[in-house]
Structures are given as structure tokens and as C-alpha cells.
Amino acid sequence: TYAAQRNAAIYHLGYSAADAHVYANRKLLDTSENGPIGYLIYTIPDGQSLINPDGTFNPNATRGYSDGTYYYTPDDWSKATFRNGLRQEYNVSVSGGNDRFNYYVSAAYLNDEGIIDNSAFDRLSTRASVEYQAKKWLKIGTNISYSFSKSKYPDLQTESGSSGNAFQVANYIAPVYPIFVRNADGSLMMNTTYNRPVYDYGDGQSTNFTRAYMSMANPASSLLYDTEEYLTDLFNGKWFVQITPIEGLSITGNVGLTIDNTRTHIISNPLYGQSASYNGQALQVAERIKGLNLQALANYRKTFFDKHTFDFLLGYESYEWNDEYTQAIGNNLYNPGSWAVNNTLNDDRRKGYGSYGAYSTRGYFGRINYDFDSKYFASFSYRRDGSSRFHPKNRWGNFYSVSAAWDIAHEAFMMSTSEWLDQLKLRASFGQQGNDGIGNNYAYLDQFTISGATEWSDGLLSYKGNPDLTWETSNAFNVGVDFSLWKGMLSGSAEFFNRQTSDMLYNKPVAPSLGYSSIPMNIGSMRNSGFEIELNYRPVTTRNITWDINYNATFVNNKILKLAPELEGELISGSRIYREGESMYQLYMVKYAGVDPATGRALYWGKDAEGNEFPTTDWSVAYNGDTASGAQANRCATGNLLPVVYGGFGTTLKVYGFDLAIACSYQLGGKIFDSGYQEMMGTGTSGEYGQTFHKDILNAWTPENPYTDVPRLDAEEAYPFFNYTTTRGLITSNYLAINNITLGYTLPSSVTKRIGIESIRVYGAADNLALWSARKGLDPRQSYTSSTTSTYTAMRCISGGVKVVF
């Protein structure tokens, strides 16, 4: 920040180097003007500056500053915001039965404290399964489960840019700000109501200072003083009756019921943060989701002449889903710890809201399987599905699949290989699947918002429906081989796949001036094709030692085949571009051209009226063009960002009761946009005051360091380098991750059976243990296009347990 102010003074104000040094120091610490820092956190001897003229830190400055009322010193936001949470899980199950009656009962308890305050999760669940052969021709059964969970889930942790996001603030705030308010003597100031520390929100009210970055924000405080919890009763039940009137024929009726009752309680505290101005807020929500599935099946299986086996299936099913939602919200809490809305003032700001949504499908299907002598296999299936999300004229879709396989190892001419060849099966299949997921249960209808106090207003269009909308269809073709050699010592599969999706469902963005922001439509077709391989090798197999090694790899290629005719082969949506004949996994951005070694300003590739590229320091010329000079916009597609190959590998070793398992994953050959890095590579402009820098900023341009790809730091730069999305943010997405290491020991059965126990296993495990990528903090597993450090990523978890089987 000092460097940005100094450069700005030299380049824009015309100051000498000495005067620029004085100016930068004054601006750096000028709290009256809410300077770059906004806080005095160092005590500086009279007549001296925090930064020396050569840019080094003044060793005589001591950390900590008192203005007579408060004491200011930096805190570690990560340590104060995050924690090492404890996870506990307990399971018990009992099963038994006889030829006519079987049962299974289980119960489990899970407690996970989470890695931030008020993010804990508790769940108590149970399951019971019973099957009873009442008559030779009649079988009945049920499988029911119930769970109660209490989830403290501050949902702002998934919203990038939110002031309530602990990851966003802890990762991006400059490491110079206090989290806590301290008395003049340095002791923590305590809140008398909650008996908790008072937190600094950087708003000029918590203390006498104001910060520019995320003023009014302190997630460490919000996570303690605010509460957000979800209490869920989840029931799943399935019941069936199976009749076998003749040998080989079974008629089955299934009923499935899911009920999800979730209550949400949210308290925004009345003392600090955005709700303090109206003395806190309470939000109370009740939501009930019900899904009912009815299914009727008729299955007939018959073998002819000992070699020809047919399996016929006919079926019908229906699914009904509905969602009932009720919400109430009020301000001005009486009891700061109560989430009940009647704990708020009954004024014109207390509001209620309710909604109801429904959705249903119907389906008819059939299947024929054929098996000849366990060597040749064939299958054909067909289904017809209807969805309430589409207009009646487009409601139904037809889907089918065919497959065939040949187990060569069972042929007579392969008998000579029986000593080393266990299986060699060739297989091929083609199948279709329908998708109606468009995000709105009435997507074919125009939807309006109406309101009023004494009479209804005219409707305001809130959702533009599309009566021509229909099913998205995925066609999948696979051909592969499965093999096993030397009694399973080496086994695996290799498969080529080609998956083509047509009539893709998409909410196409439109100009807001139309009165709506998007319209649902079938936008085109896309193809994913590639090759998959899986290998399993067992180099050692003895009575007491077993060693297995596994590896898999997927090579994939993506191509957009066709877009809706009105798009004319191309759709641009923000920083994404979709073109016929190209991958959908590419970005659309300005090309970065490096740094001008003479001035240190960032360069971008523009395009003149004749289409020739030229470097420019004006980002808007490259992005929008320039009507005055005739320059054209020069945003370009990045090309396919997908990795060439991704997959995993691992090993399992069992030695005299000990077992060790290691699972890893990898990715090679792709690129990704590192948005987290972009956030930390700002230029020190006023809009970024108080935000942290990445260490690469130390390589920024200076007259002594003219040849670099990081532009100069300049607080007055009109087009700052990394405030905009350019190709500079692309980096390789290669990674290697250790996903799990598990070490266990199973006591000898000769010991456990003496005490009436079948087996005892003690184990320890580490999940998400390590990740190596091109840049520290970059997690390419988040998506194929961009990665951020402002939301949850995979959490490291160290656990241990005991499994006892009676």
C-alpha cells in the first residue's frame, strides 16, 4: 500500500521521490481521511515514519497503539475464526432371520463440531428392514428409516464476496487489523450482556477508527453472537408386496414415501453488525417436503433348453412431489437469545410469507434380458416419461437402450487358456436418459408477482415461461472389455464412451429491459467422449499377506455440437463463451500482454480497425473497443480448459491382521482461472484499501525491476492490472492429492471368539491429507473453469475408531 501511494504521488501528482515518501507515509496512516490502513497499529517515534525512504520498515516502530480510549494491535483472523473441530460417529446394527423371515435394525449417532463456530452438525438416525415370506406365493416387506439432525450452518460461508463469509474475510483482509476491541491498557473489552469479547467491526463505532475493507464485517463475531440452525426430521419408507402366481413370474407393488420437515431458526444479534441498527432480527421458517413414489412391476424369468434364459419386465411408476413453505421475520428483539418471531416488535416491519410448489412425473417402461449359455448376453429396454414441468404438448419423452456382451473366456476354443484367463468379456451398449431439471416447476408458464394492501395490484412478470420447452436427452454409447488373469492377480477394464446430450436445458440470460432476466429453453447439443481404463494388480497373495494395487484414468473430450438457431452458433454469458464445434469449458476474456518496462503499466492486446493486434494500457479498449479510433473489442476464447486426463490410484496391504490403505487422485493437462489469486493481486487502488496482497506482489514493477509480469503498484491507476479478468489469471490445473490413508488392526479370531465376539478392528484414518498444485492455496478440484479461496474447500479430517462384530 505504501508503494502504491508513493508511485501514485510520483506519476500522477509530480512529487519528487522525497516528497512522495512523505506523502505516502501520511496517506498510509491518515485515519482522518480513512487512508489505506485507516488504523494506527504502530507507535512511531516523533519525527519518524513507519516506512523509511528506501521502502524498508522502520525498526524503531513498535506494534500496538493507544489513543487513550482504545488499544489497537493486529490479530490473526484465521486463528480467531477457524478451529479444529471434533467429529464423533457411533453405529450399531443387529440382523438375523430364517428361511421365511429376515430382519435388520441399526442406529447411528454423528456429531461434527465443524471448523468454524456455530457450524456443528448432530444427527441421530435409525433404520429397520423386514422381509416375510407369508406364503409360498406371497412375500411382504418394508424398509424404513428416520433421522433427526440439527445443523448449525451459517449459509453465508458459501457466498463469495459476502461480509459474513469467514473464509472471504480471513483470507482477504490485510493482516494489520484487530479482531477484538481492547481497553487502553491492552486488555480485552468484554460485553456485559453476553460475557464475551467485544469485536471490532471497523465501522468507526466499535472504536475510533474505520477500515475500508469490509467495514461493518467481522465474521468471528457474527458466528458467536448470531445463530443459524436447521432442525430436520427426515423419514424414508418403502413397502412392497410380491406375488408369485406361477413359477418364474413375480408381480410386485412398491410404495415409497419421503417426508422432510425442516425448521430454520436465525437470530441476528442486536449489538453488533448490520442488524444492530434495528435492535436485532429473528427469522423463523417451517418447510415440509413430501415425495410419494408408486410403482408396479411384473417380472417373468424362464430358461429354455438349459441354455436360453429370458427375463421380461413391465412396469409403471408415478412420482408426486410438493413443498410447503412458511416464513416469518421481525425486528427489535426483546430476548436477544430467542429466535421466535413473537420475540420482536409487532410493527410494520414484521412480515410473513408462504408458498406452495408441486411437481409430478409418470412413467411406463419395459425390459428384455437374454442370456445364452452364460456366454452371450443381450438386453433391450424402453420407457416413456411425462413431466409436469413441460407444456402438455411437449410433456412426454421416449427413451430406450440396448446392450450386448460376449464372455470369450467361456468359449470352447479358449479352454487351453483356462489356467491363466479367468474372464474376457466384450460389451457394448447404447442408452438414453431424460432430464427435466430446469429449476422451476412451472417452467412452461409465464409467472407474475401480485401484491397489495387493500386490493390486488396488476401482475408484474417475474418469470418468463417457454411452452416449447421439452425433455433434455442424453445418448450414451459405450464399448469396452473386462478381463481377469491368473486367478484375479491382474484384472481390469477398458472402455470407450461417447455421451451426447441434445435439447440441453438452459436459462438463457436476456436484457433486463424486457422485464425478466432469463428465459428457459432447449439450447442445443453437446458431446463428451473419451476413454477410461481401470487396472487392479495383486502382486502378493498368501494366507497372512495380501497386497493390492489399483489405478484408473479417464481421458475426456468435450464439444458443443449445436446451439439454438437464434444464437447463430455462439452464446456469451459474462466471462463464459459457448461456441458450436468447441468445448463448453472455456472462458472469454481479454488477453494479457505483459508489462511495459518503461512505465510499469499493465498491457493488454487490443485490435485495430484492420484486425491487427496491438498492446494497449487501456483495458477498456481491449474489452469494448474504441469507436473514436475504430479499434475493435479483442476478448478471446481461452480454448478448452479441461484436463487431458484425471483419475486415481491407491494400494491396500494386509499383513498378519494389520491393514493399510492409501487412496490418491490426480489431474493433468488442463488450465484453470485462479480467482483467489486475482483477488490478492490488486494494485493498491482506493477500492482495495485494507485488502491483503499475495506474496507475488513483491515482484511488482519498479525502475530497478523493469522486466516482470506484475505491473507497478499505483493507487491512482485508471485501469488497475488485476481488477479485471484477463488471461494472466490462467494457470495449470495439474494436481496430486492424498485423499485418504487408513491404518487398522484386526484382533485374531482365536482371541475374540473366546469372549463371544466375532471380530474387533481398531483403525485410524486421515482424509484430505495433502494437495499439491501449481500454487499454494489453489484447489483445482473445485471446478473445471475457476477456483477460489473464499468458500469451503475439502477439510482435513483425522479420525479413529473401533468396529466390533458380535
Image: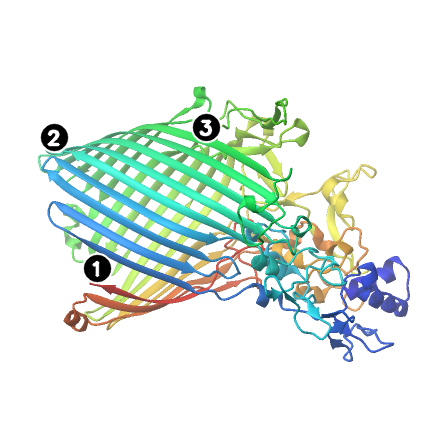
Q: Secondary structure at mark 1?
A: loop
Residue 112, percent across and down? 43, 60
Local packing at callout 2 (Cα closer than 10 Å; few below 14, some 14-19, many 20+) is few
Q: What residue did someone put label 1 on?
A: 486
Spot occupied by residue 299 in the image (x, y as percentages of width and height): 20, 32
Q: How is the image coloured?
A: rainbow
Real-space Cα distance between discs 1 and 3? 53 Å
> What's the residue type where badge 2 is placed?
Pro
Residue visible at 75% across and 73% down? 65
Give how far apart the Cα atoms at labels 3 and 2 are: 39 Å
Mark in the foreground, 1 or 2: 2
Per the rendering, the mark at residue 389 is 3
Secondary element under disc 3, as helix, strand or loop, is: loop
* Residue that label 2 marks: 245
Q: Are marks 1 and 2 in contact (CB under 8 Å)?
A: no
Q: Nearer the viewer, residue 421 or 279?
A: 279
Residue depicted at x 15% and y 53%: 416
Q: Amino acid at mark 3?
A: Arg
